[in-house]
Image (cartoon, rainbow, N blue to C red):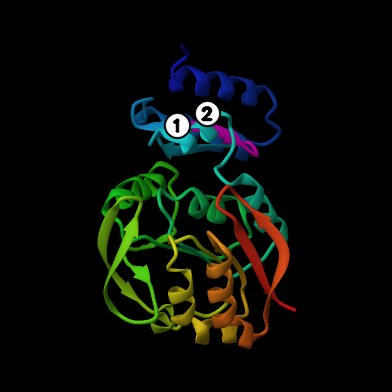
Amino acid sequence: MMTIYKKLKRWLKISQRKLCSLGDVYKLRLAKKFMKQFDEETSCHFIYKNKVVFMPDIGGVTSQHYQRGIFYEMGMLEAIRAEAKSGTYLDVGANIGNHTLYFEKFCNSDRVIAFEPLEQCLGPLKQTKKFNQLSFEIHEIGLSDRSGEFETLIGPTTYSIPVMPLDDLDLDNVSIVKIDIEGMESLALRGMLRTLERCKPILFLEAHNKDEIEEQKNVIATLGYQMSGRVWNATPTYEWRIN
C-alpha cells in the first residue's frame, strides 16, 4: 500500500511537469516540505481543486469520503461555494472542521468562525487547522439563547456544555451560517436574531423532523426567512433565505 509520502511525491512530480510560473514552483516546494510531518496514522489526505487537503483520520463514513477524494456533505458545500459570498462564514457545530476548512480554503469568505464545545471534537478540529495552515477562529463554546451551561443528548450520552448567544459577539457582515447541533438549532437561532436581522445571511439548518423545522420557522419567519426548497445530506439540512 502506497504511503502518504509516496502518493504526494508522485503528485508533486506530475504537477512539476505542468508548472507555468515560479509562483507554482514555490507553492509545490512548500507543500513538499510541509507534508513530511504527517503519516497515515494521524491524517487522511486528498487533492481537491489542485490543493492538498489534510484531515484527521477519525474513521467511519467521514474518513471514507476523504479516501474517495471528496469532502463530507460535498453537495451542500459546493452549493455554498457557488454563492460566491464574501464576508464572515459561521460553522456552528464544527465537529472536526470539514465544513470550516472548506469555507476558508475554497469559498470566497473573508473570515471563518467555528463553534464547537465538545472536547472529543476540539482536538481533531485544531489538527485540521494546523494540518492545513489555516487561520479560522475556534470558539470552544456552543450557541444558544442565553449564557451558561446546557445539557444535551448526543446519541446515548448526555453532555454538559458551555453556551452563549451569538448576538453577544456583535459580528458584522455575516453572510453564511451553517448550524448542525443535534436539535439545538432553534435555541441557537433565538440567540442570534439581532445578527440575522442586521446581516441577513443565508442559513443552512439541520432538522431531523417536521417538528424541528416548525420550531426553526417560528423563530426566524418574522425576519422574512423562507425555505428555498433546497435540501442536502443524510440528516436533512435545509436552506433558508430572506427573499
Question: Magenta part of the protein: which range?
Answer: 45-50
Image coords of residue 165 (percent x, y): 39, 79
Q: Vertically, is 132 above or below 16? A: below
Image coords of residue 50 (percent x, y): 63, 36
Q: Residues within 10 Å of mark 1 (few under 14, many from 20)?
A: many
Query: In which quadrant is the C terminus drawn?
Result: bottom right
Image coords of residue 107 (percent x, y): 62, 56
Chief SS of the magenta region: strand
Q: Vertically, is 97 above or below 42? A: below
Type of residue at label 2?
Gln
Nearest to the observer: residue 91 or residue 218 = 218
Q: How many marks?
A: 2
Magenta span includes 48: yes
Magenta span includes 143: no
198 horizontally vs 121: left or right: right
Taking the spot 56% from the left edge, 41% from the top edge, the residue there is: 71
Which numbered disc covers residue 67?
2
Nearest to the observer: residue 43 or residue 108 = 43
Circle 2 sits in a helix, a strand or a loop, which is it?
Answer: helix
Do callouts 1 and 2 mark residues in contact (Cβ within 8 Å)?
Answer: yes
The quarter holding residue 87 reads bottom right
Q: Vertically, is 36 above or below 122? A: above
195 horizontally vs 228: left or right: left
Type of residue at label 1?
Cys
Measure the alpha-carbon separation of dots 1 and 2. Answer: 7 Å
Can you identify the residue that label 1 sits on?
44
Given the current orientation, which residue lies at the most extreme top position?
1
Nearest to the observer: residue 115 or residue 19 = 115
137 horizontally vs 240: left or right: left
Which numbered disc covers residue 113?
none
Taking the spot 60% from the left edge, 49% from the top edge, the residue there is: 233
